[in-house]
Amino acid sequence: MPRKVPQRMCVACRTMKAKRELIRVVLGQDGTVTMDATGKKPGRGAYVCRSRTCIAQAVRAHRLDKGLKTAVGADVIDQLIEEMEALPEHEPTDTDHK
Ligand SMILES: [Zn+2]
């Protein structure tokens, strides 16, 4: 049996995806919100797809604030936008395969 891949829900599109396809933002025990590149930081996490659409929506609609039940700092938002800008303009889809 293959090991079950842990799934998490994107706060923007509410789709369940494998954790590695998502960006984790974590509320630490000290109350600070940080991006969690490793996925191993302790605390309550909220996830958003590695997709421009979802990151933009999460930022614009304050979905992360709601997911974490706290205000997300401007520096975290800036980091998310940087992540977004590092992504390709168009998401690869199955139809892109030659
Ligand atoms: Zn999403």
Image (cartoon, rainbow, N blue to C red):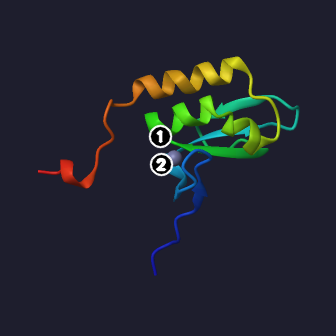
Q: Name the residue under label 2.
A: 21
Q: Residue 7, relative to residue 71: is it above or below?
A: below
Residue 91 locus on image (x, y percent): 33, 41
Residue 93: where, in percent of width, then height?
Answer: 28, 50
Residue bearing mark 1: 50
Residue at x 58% of width, y 22% of height: 79
* Label 1 vs 2, first from the N-terminus: 2
Residue at horizontal 58 percent and vertical 49 percent from the top: 10
Label 1 secondary element: loop
Which of the numbered marks, if any, corresponds to residue 86? none
For residue 42, say whether it is visible. Answer: no
Q: Which amino acid does label 2 sit on?
A: Glu
For this orientation, the residue located farthest to the left is 98
The residues bearing labels 1 and 2 have C-alpha atoms spaced at a distance of: 6 Å
Secondary structure state at the residue bearing disc 2: helix
Q: Residues within 10 Å of mark 2 (few under 14, many from 20)?
A: some
From the viewer's perspective, tell me whether residue 81 is left or right of residue 40: left
Q: In the picture shown, does residue 15 fall above or below 82? A: below
Please indicate whether residue 98 sits to the left or right of residue 75 in the image. left
**Do callouts 1 and 2 mark residues in contact (Cβ within 8 Å)?**
yes
User: Residue 40 versus residue 94: which sits nearer the camera?
Assistant: 94
Whether the residue carrying mark 2 lies under 8 Å from ligand 1 is answered with no
Say which of 23 and 93 sits in front: 93
> What amino acid type is highlighted by mark number 1?
Arg
Residue at the (54%, 49%) spot, across then down: 13
Q: Against 95, is 55 above or below? A: above
* Residue 37: x %, y % from top left: 58, 36
Is residue 97 rendered to the left or right of residue 63? left
Q: Can the viewer see residue 34? A: yes
Q: Percent from the top left, x then y, of residue 4? A: 53, 71
* Quadrant position of residue 77: top right
